[in-house]
Amino acid sequence: DTAVSQTPKYLVTQMGNDKSIKCEQNLGHDTMYWYKQDSKKFLKIMFSYNNKELIINETVPNRFSPKSPDKAHLNLHINSLELGDSAVYFCASSQLLVTGANVLTFGAGSRLTVL
Amino acid sequence: KNQVEQSPQSLIILEGKNCTLQCNYTVSPFSNLRWYKQDTGRGPVSLTIMTFSENTKSNGRYTATLDADTKQSSLHITASQLSDSASYICVVSASNSNYQLIWGAGTKLIIKP
């Protein structure tokens, strides 16, 4: 019954590899997000999709490519992984845009370690 | 520049005691302010959300206050429990076209028995 589920929870890989993180939400929300939380614990928005349409694309290297096959899924593909990509990546969802009382529901996070 | 600053960075208190966490922001135009709780190894969970006109909001033992004039918020935890050990993050939403969320770095709270 997990509301926002991400896989894998842990990912250890070598520099230069390509990897994907998957996210699914069963809340019926229209909007999904990817956040990056680095070692300093700041959460930074990377992307936001509303009904499969990209609406927020922060300054993120183009090695990161989100894909939303439907409004319940938002996957994150990362090419040519670098050491600085090591972080915890959180998927989240909300009803429409985050405005007023709309609240983000987060997944448990995917810890990526690049060696 | 839109910023959210939280203090203290970390706090250790004994179980049963009260504590207050602070949040100052320079976000404009202001839409709302949220407090999230993030347990170690988990995603943030929303505690409260307050709009411009709300001064105080409670969620069980958590009470958040907002002073929109001084751009300050506080989160007061009453009768702390071991399960309150977590990071508490203040987030401010700007009422721009994307309702951008500006995240604080969080206060790491440790409750000791």
Image (cartoon, rainbow, N blue to C red):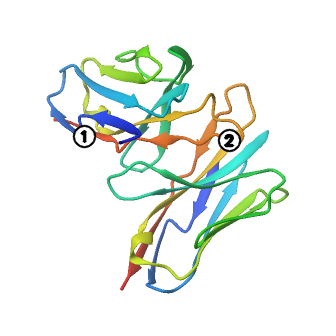
User: Residue sitting at 49 percent across and 37 percent down?
Assistant: A44
User: Residue sitting at 18 percent across and 26 percent down?
Assistant: A15
Residue B77 at what x, y percent from top left?
57, 74
Q: Can the viewer see residue B75?
A: yes
Q: Is residue A100 above or below residue A76?
A: below
Q: What residue type is labelled 1?
A: Lys
Residue B104 at what x, y percent from top left?
56, 51
Mark 2 falls within which chain?
B
Residue B93 badge: 2
* Crowding near the residue tagged with mark 2, few <14, some 14–19, many ≥20 C-alpha atoms within 10 Å: many
Residue A9 badge: 1
Mark 1 or 2: the one toward you: 1
Q: Is residue A69 left or right of residue B3?
A: left
Q: Is residue A19 left or right of residue B12?
A: left
Residue A30 found in image quarter: top right
Mark 1 falls within which chain?
A
Q: In this view, does B97 lie to the left or right of B43?
A: right
Work out how far the residue at label 1 is from the one at label 2, CA to CA, in angstroms.
Answer: 28 Å
| Viewport quadrant of the N terminus of chain B | top right
Q: What residue type is labelled 2?
A: Ser
User: Residue sitting at 31 percent across and 32 percent down?
Assistant: A85
